[in-house]
Image (cartoon, rainbow, N blue to C red):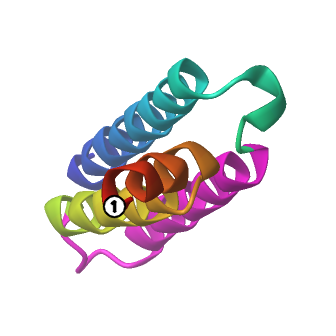
Amino acid sequence: MKKTIKTLGLAIFVVLMTATFGFAEYATASVSEFPYFQLGCLIIGGMMVISLKQKYTRFYAGELMGVFAMYTLLVALFTAPVFNAIKNLVS
């Protein structure tokens, strides 16, 4: 039961992070520039993290939340709106 609750908590975290990414990209980019590929990568990565937690009991949920948060940040850095904002800041 404890394992199921921790996996469910991790799944909720993954869904919230992915939804936050989607909302932030939708708010900053137009519909034609929405990064569907990166959103798909986040969904696949989230499913992999959840399946790792379910298969291996020695992973802590907090560790996997940190891993997915860093993965989300890395994916967000390589989207067009963020890249353009960084380019405008530098120049």
Q: Where is residue 83 in the image (x, y as percent from the top left)?
A: 51, 56
Residue type (three-letter) at the residue carrying disc 1? Val
On screen, residue 6 above or below 18: below
Q: Image point 37% across, 40% down: which residue? A: 8
Name the image quarter holding residue 48. bottom right
Q: Position of residue 7 (x, y in %)?
A: 35, 50
Residue located beneath label 1 in the image? 90
Can residue 49 be found in the magenta stretch? yes
Can residue 59 be found in the magenta stretch? yes
Looking at the image, which is closer to me, 81 or 89?
89
Name the image quarter holding residue 44. bottom right
Give left or right: position of 80 versus 64.
Answer: right
Q: Tell me the magenta residue range.
A: 36-60
Looking at the image, which is closer to me, 20 or 55?
20
Give left or right: position of 80 versus 3.
Answer: right
The number of numbered badges drawn on the structure is 1
